[in-house]
Image (cartoon, helix red, strand yellow):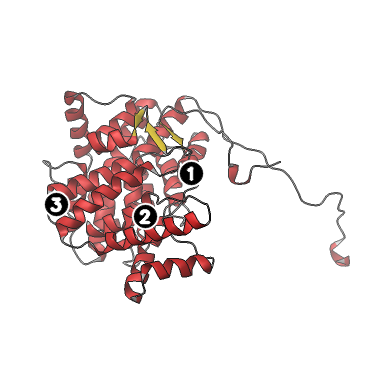
Amino acid sequence: MAAKGLEGVVVAQSRLSDINGEVGELIYAGYDIDDLARNTTFEEVCYLLWNGELPTPTQLEEFSAHLRKHATLRPEVVEMIRNYPTDADPMAAVRTAVSALGMFDPDADDISIESVRHKAIFLTAQTPAIVAAYERVRNGKEPLDPKPDLGFAANFLYMLNGEEANETRVRTMDVALVLHAEHGMNASTFAARVTAGTLADVYSAVTSALGTLKGPSHGGANVEVMNMLREIDESGEDPGAWVRNALSGGKKVMGFGHRVYKATDPRATVLRELADKIMAEAGETRWLDLSDRIRAVMAEEMEKKGKKIYPNVDFFSASVYSTLGISMDLFTAVFAIARMPGWTAHLLEQYADNRLIRPGSDYIGPRDRKVTPLSER
């Protein structure tokens, strides 16, 4: 019997992350996500995923310098972004630019481990610059080069908004990136590994991942959460009544439940705390207030049905990203920025112990048919 969607099928061994959905646990290379989110930076997590260990201070300084070195877009890429339609989907813009980077790399087809490590750093550094450049160009603004004295998250917010963010905003962005950096054999990661399994280059594999993440069933959940929050806010309807009407009408309340987690998504817990801080500082708490009301009503309604369903990371990332000044249609592109180290870490594993990924399928079509001559059909 075929496993629809490959659910429950183990397709690889990995040292990168593990998810225990029954208890709400996520670990990266042995470290609990809550511990990492509270005590490390995105740069440290990148290093961990690519090297299996957290960096020493000296290693982190050298590693961060490598990231900054590759964070500026070449003029040809900027010019290409200037020629994109301003109404293009940002994920299409990112996918196209990342694919194009491969044509400018004379060593694109080198899939030796050292070369893949270099490309991992390069692509992780380039992706936020691409997202920020497209956002500014489509709004009639000039793209900005990163500042050499800013960290990864701080530089992204600077290149995006044109001004340096304060410590709270930078830390919030940094933690959000950490929380989304890796998540097991999800659809986009699997797509990247399938492409790499053919011994295609890193750029092709990552472009496959980006194309997969673009699909709303994978990468667009927080956009749908924000659409829901705006719909409730603009309607003036009581959030509790809206949720009950949605449930009675068979409509899904976005941001609840997860394909993997049967308990609380551990990423949501950390992001909820950050949302509280950043929105209180901004003096605008309506999205969080609305989210908390929806969460409370969902808990009440699920209890009546004897069910447990919890908010996932997308439920809070939507309002956090909005407060950071990130346009709603950029949410999935920000997801791509965060996931680039995870994708490339999986590519390192795939290339190091490669086998062509070629699953079978159960044929359920007809048999024993005979061709009728064309003149008689």
Disc on res. 262 = 1
Residue situated in front as seen by the camera: 335 or 191: 335
CA separation in Å, label 2 and label 3 = 23 Å
Q: Earlier in the sequence, mark 1 or mark 2?
A: 1
Q: Residue at x 17, y 54 (%)?
A: 144
CA separation in Å, label 1 and label 2 = 16 Å
Q: Residue at x 47, y 70 (%)?
A: 245
- Count of labels in the image: 3
Q: Earlier in the sequence, mark 2 or mark 3?
A: 3
Q: Residue at x 64, y 42 (%)?
A: 3
Give amino acid for label 1: Lys
Relative placement, left or right, of 69 versus 123 is left
CA separation in Å, label 1 and label 3 = 36 Å
**Residue that carries the numbered disc 3 in the rendered image:** 165
Relative placement, left or right, of 73 versus 309 is left
- Mark 1 vs mark 3: in front: 1
Disc on res. 315 = 2
Disc on res. 122 = none
Q: Quadrant of the N terminus?
A: top right
Horizontal and vertical percent position of residue 147: 13, 45
Q: Quadrant of residue 174?
A: top left
Instruction: Determine contact: label 2, label 3, CB under 8 Å.
Output: no
Q: Earlier in the sequence, mark 1 or mark 3?
A: 3
